[in-house]
Amino acid sequence: MAAVAQQSRFGSVFWTVLAWVVALIFFFPIFWMVFTSFKTDADAVKPEHLFLFTPTLENYLNMTENYDYWRFAKNSAITATFATLFALFVGVPCAYAMAFNPSRHTKDILVWMLSTKMLPAAAVLYPMTFLTKNFLQIFDTHFLIVLVLCLINLPIAIWMLFTYFKEIPKEIIEAGKMDGVSTWGEIKDILIPLAWGGVASTALLTFIFCWNEAYWTVRLTTTEAATLSKLIEGNRAPEGLFFGRLSAVSTAAVGPIVVLGWFCQKQLVRGLTFGAVK
């Protein structure tokens, strides 16, 4: 018995240490980014100043005073919020229809939607740029970025919502129909309250994906609708990268989404594990 208890204790300590090691490995790039943000551009590239340097807020002050950080942050918040809301507005009815009124083509449609994520973004960059600049005249607008972010994240949102809705007994929806509840009433008064954890986690993940999107927000904007990704990309010059300023801007861009994830972690975990325990 003593040997079994000792082995169990060793296993517990081993897995705990291993979990901490893995967590530190994943967290180290974020730590190094924040650490570098308090260096000047000169100190950031000098090996002798790897740890011995004078901390400075110069990069953050320069970011807010000269680079108009708040305008880029506002654009990121606007586009990510409206893209998320629009994705839910379209995704919830779609997932509802496929979960509770499936046809023989439902699985094919779900697979087709997911397959659109496999399309290389570079393959449609030129047509998108040409059309939005010369015909639609919506290049570098919030509407274009919201539309693009919604469309590229809609398949994932529908898949997640479909999975959550499938866990809800169909009899509950049928009972609502027998009581004369309209389709919109079923979604608003029955479905969403029952699957609120799943809807919230879908919204949170969609918002994170929209906030972090860099490829399209960099290439479909110039000034008016430019997001934080554009600001980060701007810290590049022919002579190289400005690592101090780049780290400060990246920290300021990552910070809001990390704080949001921290405060919403219970809701996120509840939504991601929705229906896992019977």
Image (cartoon, rainbow, N blue to C red):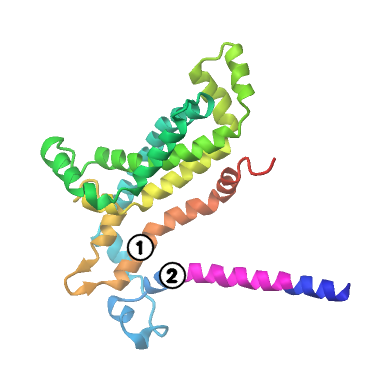
Q: From the viewer's perspective, is residue 82 above or below residue 20? A: above
In front of the other: 148 or 243: 148
- Examine the rendered structure and indicate whether residue 177 appears above or below residue 29: above
Q: Is residue 78 visible?
A: no
Left or right: residue 265 compared with residue 226 = right
Q: Earlier in the sequence, mark 2 or mark 1?
A: 2
The residue at the point 60 percent across, 34 percent down is 167
Q: Nearer the viewer, mark 2 or mark 1?
A: 2
Amino acid type at mark 2: Pro
**Label placed on residue 29:** 2
Residue holding disc 1: 250
Res 163 → quadrant = top right
State which region is magenta: 11-31
| Crowdedness near tag 2: few (<14), some (14–19) or many (≥20) residues, C-alpha within 10 Å | few
Quadrant location of the N terminus in the rendered image: bottom right
Coordinates of residue 121 in the picture (x, y in percent): 27, 50
- Dominant SS of magenta comes to helix
Query: In the picture, residue 146 is in which quadrant?
Result: top left
Residue at the image position 43 percent from the left and 36 percent from the top: 110
Residue 14 drawn in magenta:
yes
What is the secondary structure assignment of the residue under circle 2?
A: helix
